[in-house]
Image (cartoon, rainbow, N blue to C red):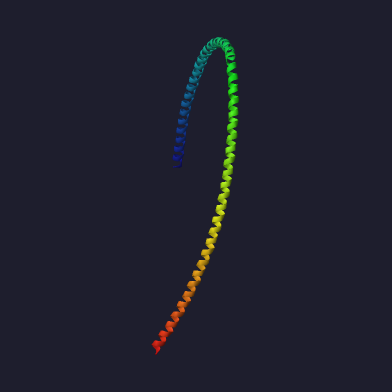
Amino acid sequence: MEQNLHNDELLAAQSEIRHLKNTLVALRSRLESMQFEGQENVQRAIVERQDEIAQLRDTAGALRDELDKLNHDKDRAVQEAIASRHDEVRQLTQTIQALREELDNLNHDKDKAVQEAVQQGAEEIRQLRQTSRALREELDSIGFSYEGKIEELRQSCRDECRQLQSTISALREKLETQNGK
């Protein structure tokens, strides 16, 4: 029985080795195929890039010629613009100066308005604090007054309770005296 178990394990191991060898052969084949495709893609890319480089060189030459022409036209246009814009710059400088002066005036007016608002706010805060203090004092005074009245009422209630208890006692004694007769 042990021999059969050993043979079964041996067959299973051989089967697994055979399977692994087949997998290895398939993977090698796939790897070689991928390497071949990769080399073809590299060659194709090299050819495409060489064509692209040639086209870019031609384009660069044409662009360089166009750029030289544009630079010449630009230099001429710049000189014309400089000549025609000198007066405009002078006018803009004057406008900027006038706007700066107006801005300074507005800032001054704004600062003055802010100071006035701050002063008004400070005065209002001062008045509100005074009002708050006066109300707090009045509230404290009212609280003390009510506490005094409440204490008076309590005392009055205690006195009345004592009086009623003594009346009850007197009436009870009188009733007992009449019943006892």
Which residue shows up at 58% across the image and 30% down it? 103
Q: x, y (%) of residue 162?
A: 48, 77
Number of marks in picture = 0
Residue at point 52%, 61% (across, down): 142
Q: Nearer the viewer, residue 177 or 35?
A: 177
Nearer-the-camera pick, 82 or 12: 82
Where, by quadrant of the figure, is residue 63 drawn? top right
Which of the 4 quarters of the picture holds residue 171?
Answer: bottom left
Relative vertical location of residue 96 with respect to residue 71 in this rendering, above or below: below
Q: Position of residue 145 (x, y in %)?
A: 53, 64
x then y, percent, for residue 25: 47, 26
Residue depicted at 42% across the width and 85% down the height: 174
Q: Is residue 9 above or below residue 127?
A: above
* 30 up-or-down from 128: above or below: above
Q: Nearer the viewer, residue 15 or 8?
A: 15
118 lies left or right of 154: right
Q: Does residue 85 appear left or right of residue 172 in this picture? A: right
59 in relation to 144, above or below: above
Q: Quadrant of the N terminus?
A: top left
Quarter of the image containing the C terminus?
Answer: bottom left
Q: Quadrant of residue 118?
A: top right
